[in-house]
Image (cartoon, coloured by chain):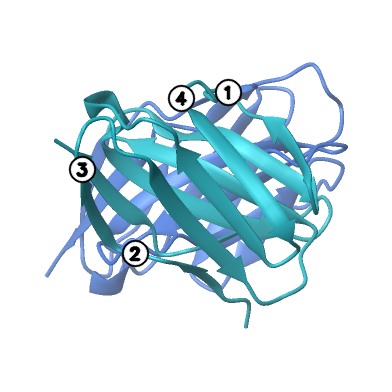
Chain colours: A blue, B cyan
Amino acid sequence: AQTVTQSQPEMSVQEAETVTLSCTYDTSESNYYLFWYKQPPSRQMILVIRQEAYKQQNATENRFSVNFQKAAKSFSLKISDSQLGDTAMYFCAFMGANDYKLSFGAGTTVTVRA
Amino acid sequence: DVKVTQSSRYLVKRTGEKVFLECVQDMDHENMFWYRQDPGLGLRLIYFSYDVKMKEKGDIPEGYSVSREKKERFSLILESASTNQTSMYLCASSPIVSEQYFGPGTRLTVT
């Protein structure tokens, strides 16, 4: 399995502010996919954003955007204008281009304060 | 919308019992997966299946087996449950080489 590292176990942010979650990964592949998943307290894991390694442009999805640095093997998630509903655990995940399997980081718990 | 369902949200079993966790998806996805989630470890892949009756071991298959007799259903079996199998179990499905869609999870406690 590929190694995915999330170095921040917990983060706290004030409502309406911005928070950035870090993720690094280790791979020798040149093409792959990266994902951020969100798991709210209700437990249903949902996809937040997806990045394909061959695309230079950073993916965005409404208030969620990534900073993909391929050479540094870094894939951070920025949550802008944080909302209470963003409170969740966030997982970074890696998948090889010719693979079915996801490798997950340990997760970062984000708490949005009112 | 893709829907992945799991048979139980909470389950309590005794050591040595045979345990079945069921997962059903309604999107005709080829791939199905079983993970366990433990604090500080993220999600770890137990088994996955890329077609009916086809399966492959993931990173932590010991103590588990799986069954996929129909495309929409993927079962995880604990042949003889042990306390170290107390965990959250998540099922997922996906079309070929794409993001995965997760079920709500089953919190299994083995006493």
Q: What is the x, y in percent for residue B38?
A: 32, 34
First in sequence: mark 2 vs mark 3: 2
Residue at mark 4 to residue at mark 2: CA–CA distance: 20 Å
Do the residues indicated by labels 1 and 2 lie within the same chain of the protein?
A: yes
First in sequence: mark 4 vs mark 2: 2
Name the kind of residue labelled 3 in the image. Thr
Quadrant assignment for the N terminus of chain A? top right
The answer for which chain carries disc 2 is: B
Q: CB atoms at circles 1 and 2 under 8 Å apart?
A: no
The answer for which chain carries disc 4 is: B
First in sequence: mark 1 vs mark 2: 2
Residue at mark 1 to residue at mark 4: CA–CA distance: 12 Å
Q: Residues within 10 Å of mark 1 (few under 14, many from 20)?
A: few
Q: Secondary structure at mark 2?
A: loop
Question: What residue would you read off at disc 4?
Answer: B63
Q: Residue at x 62, y 28 (%)?
A: B58
Tell whether A94 sits left or right of B65: right
First in sequence: mark 1 vs mark 3: 1
Q: Residue at x 77, y 52 (%)?
A: A57
